[in-house]
Amino acid sequence: MKTAIVYYSMLGNTDYAVNKIKNAIDCDVIRLTPEKAYPDKGFKKFLWGGKSAVMGEKPRLLPYRFEYDKYDRVIFGTPVWASSFAPPLRTFIEENRGGLKGKDFSLIMCCSGGGTDKVTEKLKKALGVDSLTAQVTLIDPKDKPSEENESKIKEFITKLKG
Ligand SMILES: Cc1cc2nc3c(=O)[nH]c(=O)nc-3n(C[C@H](O)[C@H](O)[C@H](O)COP(=O)(O)O)c2cc1C
């Protein structure tokens, strides 16, 4: 199955997870970058990112290449922001709605606590699908390395290969 991993990462945790997964499966990786970077320090980081997620914003992205007909499967990677997926993914889904039709979807979520059931529901709604093939929730895998995160990444890879 030809796979694209499409992700956003502000602080490097999702990036860390994506890098581990990309080395284990055959895939292309597309990192989304907003034209206007979100503040990434202090309280402002939570304020602006949180507001943007709650409002369902679709920030403009720097140019990326997604040749949708090359892929059967798309794995999304995102930090959890205010119990949602990060807004750059919303932009991507909107910009590629037609090209994403009929693909198999999976999800990598990085968070510091929880609330990820809602993230899954919101992503399914945005994609217009009833289910995701595989999903994994990791607790700050770069900043708080743990056996649990590493074994969840392995399990996720096994499921993708199955
Ligand atoms: C704007 C913002 C909102 C966040 N909201 C949540 C949340 O609702 N639940 C949670 O567990 N973590 C939340 N976090 C923490 C991040 O999801 C977590 O640190 C994640 O691993 C960061 O991924 P990244 O390093 O790829 O950006 C939030 C972080 C930011 C910046």
Image (spheres, grey):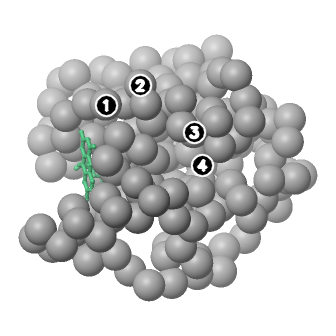
Residues under labels 2 and 3: Cα distance? Answer: 10 Å
Disc 2 CB within 8 Å of nearest ligand 1 atom: no
> Residue tagged by mark 4?
5
Three-letter residue code for mark 2: Asp
Q: Are marks 2 and 1 in contact (CB under 8 Å)?
A: yes
Residues under labels 3 and 1: Cα distance? Answer: 13 Å
Disc 1 CB within 8 Å of nearest ligand 1 atom: yes
The circle drawn on residue 115 is 1
> Residue tagged by mark 2?
117
The circle drawn on residue 67 is none
Q: x, y percentage for residue 109?
A: 40, 38
User: Is 147 placed left or right of 18 in the picture?
Assistant: left
Residue neighbourhood size for the residue with mark 3, other residues' Cα within 10 Å, grouped as few (<14), some (14–19), many (≥20):
many
Q: Earlier in the sequence, mark 4 or mark 3?
A: 4
Q: Are marks 1 and 4 in contact (CB under 8 Å)?
A: no
**Which label sits in the foreground, 4 or 3?**
3
Q: Are marks 4 and 3 in contact (CB under 8 Å)?
A: no
Three-letter residue code for mark 1: Gly
Residues under labels 2 and 4: Cα distance? Answer: 21 Å
